[in-house]
Every structure is written in structure tokens, then in C-alpha cells.
Image (cartoon, coloured by chain):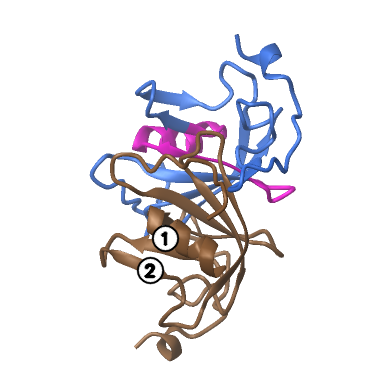
Chain colours: A brown, B blue
């Protein structure tokens, strides 16, 4: 391990991480990161998160193949939020869109499907 | 109020909101949003958050003048994260940078100051 900024993982041991496409600059998703997930991300170059629903370390795309290759990790001024700059394989969203933010708050969909989730998730 | 997607504010009544510059597409900051903050954002067109440290509704830029004019609010697939697309006056970060994500995880600074915080915050 090289020297890293001392991330404040707070009371629950997790920080939010924003994944942004390094090319299009689209914001793809937000998920939570544990110290282990951050270390796995930095060690492997693939985005890892902590799945709060499954309560386990989560390599994004491990089952779907929609891996995120991380080109840079940034930390915010308060050191309690991360930004992953990634190349996204397939799409980030389990609904088949490139981004999880495919709807406006009024419900209007602003992004098309880039894959059929039935083909990817069983 | 028009119809909005039913946001899941969870146990603590807050969701994370990512603010992204609508022009440059830079991710500017992440903060938390209460139902009142979301409603104030949609009603006024200026980004509102909930300050966890001050425990109050927070109009971004109210004291610094660095307001965020919101052009669109998006919600993610799980309906527990928001994306504010904004025009940022001044800079989003209290350190004087346009973005709070001005450092790589190794501590290297990747963004310059756009204002002097001593001139803005007393």
C-alpha cells in the first residue's frame, strides 16, 4: 500500500462512492464502499463496493460481466465521499441502462436500454 | 406539486444527492437531501440540501453566494439517490475549488482554486 488520504468511513464503516464514466462523464451510479472494498479497488483496478443488501464485498460486474475498470479514484474535501472514474463494460444499471440515473424526478425516462437485463441477470 | 417518483428516504430521512455541472459534466459535490430539501429545490430551482452538521435545511450558496441553479433532478433505479444537474456560481467547494473532488486518493491535487476562500467565508 502506498500512502492514501485518510478516508473517514464514519459510524457504519461505509462511504458513498460515485461512479462516473471517464469518457462520457455521465454519472453512472452511487454505491457504498468499505475499507476492504476501497483496498480491493486500488489493488485490482476494478471497482469494488460493499453490498448493503447482501452484506458482502461486491465486485461490480462479477456476475453480469459489466465490470468497471477504474482509471482514477478521487476523494472529496471532507474525505467522506469517493469518486470512481471508470470505463464501464455493458451498462452500470441492472435495468439495462448505461446509467442508474435514467429518470428525471418526474418519472420521465431520459436514457434508453443498452442491454436486455433478461439476457444478463437470471 | 406535480407527480414525482416516490423517493426512498430510508431510516434517517435523507438521501445522497450528487451535484454535477450541467455544462462541464464535472461532479461537483455530494450532500444529503431531506424531503423538505427536495421540495425546496423543485419549488425554487436552487439546490437545497440538509446540513447534517448544522442539522438544518441548507440552501447551497446562501452565505457564500455560490448558488447552484438546478436544470434537472434525476433519481436512480433504486430511488434512493438523486442527481442534481446544476449551473454552479463561483465554486462548489469551501476550499476554493470548483469541485470538492479536487484530490486523487493518493493526495495529489488535480484542480486549482477558482476563488480565495478567505474572501468568501468569514
> What is the crowding at mark 2: few (fewer than 14 residues within 10 Å), some, or many (at least 20)?
some
User: Is label 1 or label 2 in front?
Assistant: 1
Front residue (pair B72, B122): B122
Neighbor class of circle 1 (other Cα within 10 Å; few <14, some 14-19, many 20+) is: many
**Mark drawn on residue A37:** 1
Residue B5 in the image, given as x and y percentages of width and height: 39, 54
Q: Residue at x 50, y 63 (%)?
A: A41
Looking at the image, which is closer to me, A1 or A39?
Answer: A1
Give me the chain letter of mark 1.
Answer: A
Residue extending furthest top?
B122
Q: Name the residue that disc number 2 marks.
A: A58
Q: Chain of mark 2?
A: A
- Please provide percent x and percent y for residue B117: 67, 19
Highlighted range, magenta: B21-48
Q: Quadrant of the N terminus of chain B?
A: top left
Q: Horizontal placement of A102 versus A14: left or right?
A: right
Kindly indicate whether the residue at mark 2 contacts the one at mark 1 (C-beta within 8 angstroms): yes
Q: For the residue labelled by badge 1, is the local secondary structure a helix, a strand or a loop?
A: helix
Is residue A77 shown above or below B3? above
Q: Residue furthest front?
A: A1
The quadrant holding residue A21 is bottom right
Amino acid at each position: 500500500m502506498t500512502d492514501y488520504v485518510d478516508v473517514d468511513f464514519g459510524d457504519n464503516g461505509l462511504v458513498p462512492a460515485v461512479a462516473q464514466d471517464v469518457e462520457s462523464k455521465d454519472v453512472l451510479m452511487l454505491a457504498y464502499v468499505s475499507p476492504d472494498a476501497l483496498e480491493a479497488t486500488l489493488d485490482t483496478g476494478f471497482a469494488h463496493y460493499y453490498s448493503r443488501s447482501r452484506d458482502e464485498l461486491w465486485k461490480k460486474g462479477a456476475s453480469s460481466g459489466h465490470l468497471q475498470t477504474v482509471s482514477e479514484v478521487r476523494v472529496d474535501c471532507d474525505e467522506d465521499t469517493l469518486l470512481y472514474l471508470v470505463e464501464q463494460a455493458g451498462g452500470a444499471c441492472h435495468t439495462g441502462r448505461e446509467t442508474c440515473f435514467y429518470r428525471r424526478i418526474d418519472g420521465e425516462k431520459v436514457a434508453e436500454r443498452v442491454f436486455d437485463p433478461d439476457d444478463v441477470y437470471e
